[in-house]
């Protein structure tokens, strides 16, 4: 049975770039946009054109060079924003305007000093206006995570009638639990008239560490687009991480959902974005962190050396990582030491290994990690006659 496709909407260059200290210049954005296109994302949110002349130029330049993906520009539900975005996207092969407004009671009351009916009117006006420039119009209901479902359904119905092709349901504050977010998608799927004319999209923030889980729950319950960023960067605690959702769907084939992402480019793309933004990837980051395929405890190392799958659910090659690594620390066992010693030229007998292991533990208690040069020294200190295989 062929899998249903989940579209990947990458917002590294918009929501991701909002992170303090991560600002990119146009040239850097173009390099990243080209890479995202090669990676196979369906949509690149290139920026917020009205926000600055620099962002306008970046969106316009990206629109010109991207070959496959849809290029999208963010706007508020404001005519001028929409006009400027349309202008920036003029040269895109597949342009999309992303417009929207806050729909939670707190946004309606405190941000807009307005009321529910007036917000629906503004939403419809914005979508209709965007539709006069481009065919593909995505509507976001900001703070949908805290918006009452019945009202949210009315908003969605109204903007679909006005021509919205995608309905973005952002958990803007990262508040929802996965079941709650999934139930919201299911409710919209079942209660919005005309829902078959639009795609539901997940846009989850990570304030409680649930962005990825919420996005997966969203697609299990009927959404067919995930908005995400490379390395999960984004406002505050970040957005849904692209590499995580892609690999979750791939590792769970019975969900019958997949993306068009070339997963072999995930690691190098993560490194590229991290370097260009000056934003290090945390070592324990799923899929792309430096420890994601590193094993340091003796029990795990022994298992991985015997058969990789005992402690690894993903083949590192699948995400563009050369190999798993066996890290030597004071928690490592003889199997790991023998394996690493062999890699640097020493084939140790059992008796030799026992002696070397004793010295190794003394070294390892003093150091955080024992590296290849240390192994030579340890062997020398063990002062045994070891047959070199180098
Ligand atoms: O988090 C959010 O609500 C957003 C919207 C502007 C799409 O980023
Ligand atoms: Zn966001």
Image: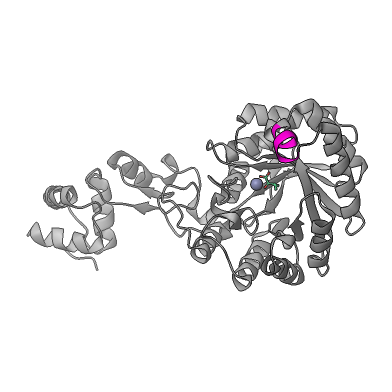
**Magenta residue check for 379:** no
The spot of residue 292 in percent (x, y) is 44, 49
Query: What's the magenta bit mostly, secondary-structure-wise?
Result: helix
The spot of residue 286 in percent (x, y) is 49, 46
* Residue at x-position 24% and y-position 43%: 331
> Relative to 11, does residue 111 appear above or below in the rendering?
above
The answer to whether residue 197 shows anywhere in this view is no
* Residue at x-position 24% and y-position 51%: 368
- The residue positioned farthest toward the left in the image shown: 383
Quadrant for the C terminus, please: bottom left
| Residue 255 or residue 348, whichever sits in front | 255
The image quadrant that residue 248 belongs to is top right
| Residue 330 or residue 46, whichever sits in front | 46
Highlighted range, magenta: 106-112
The image quadrant that residue 348 belongs to is bottom left
The spot of residue 321 in percent (x, y) is 48, 58
The answer to whether residue 224 shows anywhere in this view is yes
The image quadrant that residue 249 belongs to is top right
> Relative to 21, does residue 192 appear above or below in the rendering?
above
Question: As drawn, is 338 to the left or to the right of 322?
Answer: left
* Residue at x-position 62% and y-position 56%: 12
The spot of residue 339 in percent (x, y) is 28, 53
Disc count in the image? Answer: 0
Question: As drawn, is 365 to the left or to the right of 141?
Answer: left
């Amino acid at each position: 049975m062929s899998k249903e496709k989940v579209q990947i909407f990458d917002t590294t260059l918009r929501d991701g770039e909002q992170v303090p200290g991560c600002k990119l210049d146009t040239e850097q954005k173009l390099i990243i946009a080209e890479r995202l296109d090669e990676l196979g994302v369906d949509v690149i949110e290139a920026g917020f054109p009205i926000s600055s002349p620099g962002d306008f130029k970046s969106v316009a330049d990206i629109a010109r060079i991207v070959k496959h993906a849809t290029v999208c520009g963010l706007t508020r539900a404001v005519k001028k924003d929409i006009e400027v975005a349309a202008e920036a996207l003029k040269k895109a092969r597949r342009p999309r305007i992303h417009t929207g407004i806050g729909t939670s009671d707190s946004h309606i009351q405190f941000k807009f000093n307005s009321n529910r009916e007036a917000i629906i009117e503004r939403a419809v006006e914005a979508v209709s206006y965007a539709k006069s420039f481009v065919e593909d119009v995505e509507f976001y209901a900001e703070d949908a995570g805290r918006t009452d479902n019945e009202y949210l359904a009315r908003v969605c119905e109204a903007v679909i009638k006005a021509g919205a092709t995608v309905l973005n349901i952002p958990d803007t504050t990262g508040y929802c639990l996965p079941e709650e977010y999934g139930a919201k998608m299911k409710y919209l799927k079942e209660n919005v008239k005309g829902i078959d004319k639009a795609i539901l999209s997940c846009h989850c923030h990570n304030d409680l560490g649930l962005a990825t889980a919420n996005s997966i729950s969203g697609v299990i319950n009927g959404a067919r687009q995930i908005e995400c960023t490379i390395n999960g960067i984004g406002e505050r605690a970040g957005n849904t991480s692209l590499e995580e959702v892609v690999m979750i769907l791939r590792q769970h084939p019975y969900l019958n959902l997949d993306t068009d992402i070339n997963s072999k480019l995930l690691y190098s793309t993560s490194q590229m974005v991290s370097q260009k933004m000056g934003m290090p990837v945390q070592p324990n980051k799923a899929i792309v962190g430096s420890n994601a395929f590193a094993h340091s405890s003796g029990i795990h190392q022994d298992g991985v050396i015997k058969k990789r799958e005992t402690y690894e659910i993903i083949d590192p090659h699948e995400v563009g990582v050369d190999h798993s690594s066996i890290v030597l620390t004071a928690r490592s066992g003889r199997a790991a030491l023998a394996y690493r010693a062999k890699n640097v030229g020493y084939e140790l007998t059992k008796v030799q290994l026992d002696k070397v292991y004793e010295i190794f533990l003394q070294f390892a208690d003093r150091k955080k990690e024992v590296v290849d040069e240390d192994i030579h020294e340890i062997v020398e200190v063990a002062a045994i006659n070891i047959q070199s295989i180098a």
